[in-house]
Amino acid sequence: MFFKKSLTFAALAFVGFTAAQSSGTAILADYTYPDSITCGLSTCPISGEWIGVNQTFFNTHGCGTVLTLTTEDNSRTTTAPVCDICDDCPITYFKVPPVVQGELGGGVSVPLTVNWHT
């Protein structure tokens, strides 16, 4: 019985470890402040910051998953939760409000490539 519980715990720990290792590269696109977002403006954003992702990414990560975004040269980092679905974004694009772009040194007219991880 002890062995079975140990295997179950180990399997759950591995699943948690695997999920924590999600990472990739994305291009940040401009995002004006909408009237509403998928996960709710009053519950999901942290200090006015959030990320809009495509449906596939959203289905995998869901509301509130906090992503760390880092510039390609590793000079700037910020965090923001996944809070919205971006209908016109390919999986390699995230839409973020200007405050997130600003924290990463990006501008409104220049796309910014970042590395992300959960």
Image: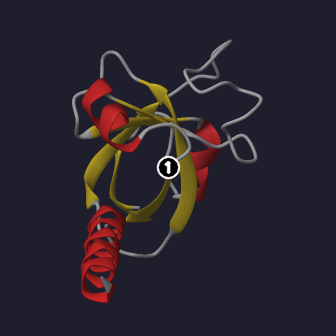
Front residue of this view, candidates 25 and 110:
25
Residue under pointer 1: 65
Instruction: Name the residue at 60% across, 38% down.
Output: 98
User: Seen from this angle, which residue lies furthest top?
Assistant: 35
Question: Residue visible at 52% across and 37% down?
Answer: 63
In the picture, the quarter occupied by the C terminus is bottom left
Q: Quadrant of the N terminus?
A: bottom left
| Coordinates of residue 94 in the picture (x, y in percent) | 38, 37
Where residue 60 sits, quadrant-wise, is top left
Q: Amino acid under label 1?
A: Thr
Q: Residues within 10 Å of mark 1 (few under 14, many from 20)?
A: some
Decide if residue 111 is in sight here.
Answer: no
| Image position of 51 (left or right of 113) | right
Residue 66 percent across, percent down from the top left: 52, 54
| Residue 96 visible at all | yes
Work out whether 64 lies above or below 52: below
Residue 61 x, y percent position in the rendering: 38, 44
Q: Is 116 on the left or on the right of 105, as rendered?
A: left
Label 1 residue SS: loop
Q: Viewer-proximal residue, 82 or 1?
A: 1
Q: Residue at left 68%, top 12%?
A: 35
Q: Quadrant of residue 69?
A: bottom left
Of residues 36 and 69, which is closer to you in this image? 36
Query: Where in the figure is residue 8, as x and y percent of width and height?
Result: 29, 73
Residue located at (25% from left, 87% from top): 3
